[in-house]
Image (spheres, grey):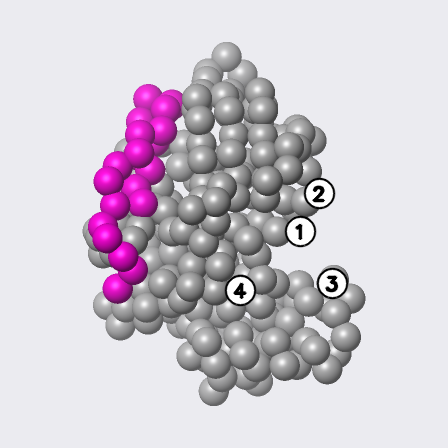
Amino acid sequence: MSPLLTLHHLRKSFGERQLFDIDLLNIAAGTAYVLTGLNGAGKSTLLRVLGGLESAEAEAAAFAGEAVRFSPYPQAMRESVIYVHQHPVMFSTSVAANIAYGLVARGVPRQRIDALVDDAMAWAGVAHLRDSRTQTLSGGEKQRIALARAKVLQPRLLLLDEPTSNLDGAAREQVLALIPSLTASGASVIMACHDRDLIALRGVHRLKLSGGRIQVRAQRSRVA
């Protein structure tokens, strides 16, 4: 597996309190990871740092085979890394418009946007909700729409913060079923979670954040 993101001595502090000092974080291309750890260990903060939403320092960094400066956050990563919050923000528009938002912001031609949004809605199983307003949707539907809105931008690294934490059984299973296809399309995925079924997915590597350090755990053989 070729490396997508490599960070050496990634450090994050709040005042005098050091949250983490990670000697080496190596994320392979087209690979899924679960990020586990106790509440307060810094899992969400680490995802936000990787997504450029919070600042941190790294002694050395490389993305997609090219050396980059991690602070300020590199433009190459800004265009290729997407963070999805555990409570996704939905705009007060239709489902289709929500999924198209990032493509519109990037200036993608309208005809191309329509085709990409159609594909993303079919992938997420929300095509029947195309014209629905997001205020009427369930938590599971919003999570799948947030995943579609991220996937449609073809990220190289997708960061998911507790993607199943607030979902009931059926909605949770629907979200779980989408994860393997993300890496199959070539994206790398890091999921902060406590969900045992996510942790147990075949082919998913486990990263445990403990005491400000990353421990790499053995993974199952392949994605189911």
Give left or right: position of 21 versus 216: right
The local secondary structure at tag 2 comes to helix
Residue 151 is labelled as 4
Give the mark nearer the N terminus: 4 vs 2. 2
Residue 33 is labelled as none
Residue that mark 3 sits on = 105
Give the amino acid at mark 1: Glu
The local secondary structure at tag 1 comes to loop
Give the mark nearer the N terminus: 3 vs 1. 1
For mark 4, does the 10 Å Cα neighbourhood hold few (<14), some (14 to 19), or many (20 or more) residues? many
Disc 4 to disc 2, C-alpha distance: 19 Å
**Which residues are drawn in magenta?**
205-224
Give the mark nearer the N terminus: 4 vs 1. 1
Residue 75 is labelled as 2
Q: Residue at x 66, y 51 (%)?
A: 79
Q: Are marks 1 and 2 in contact (CB under 8 Å)?
A: yes
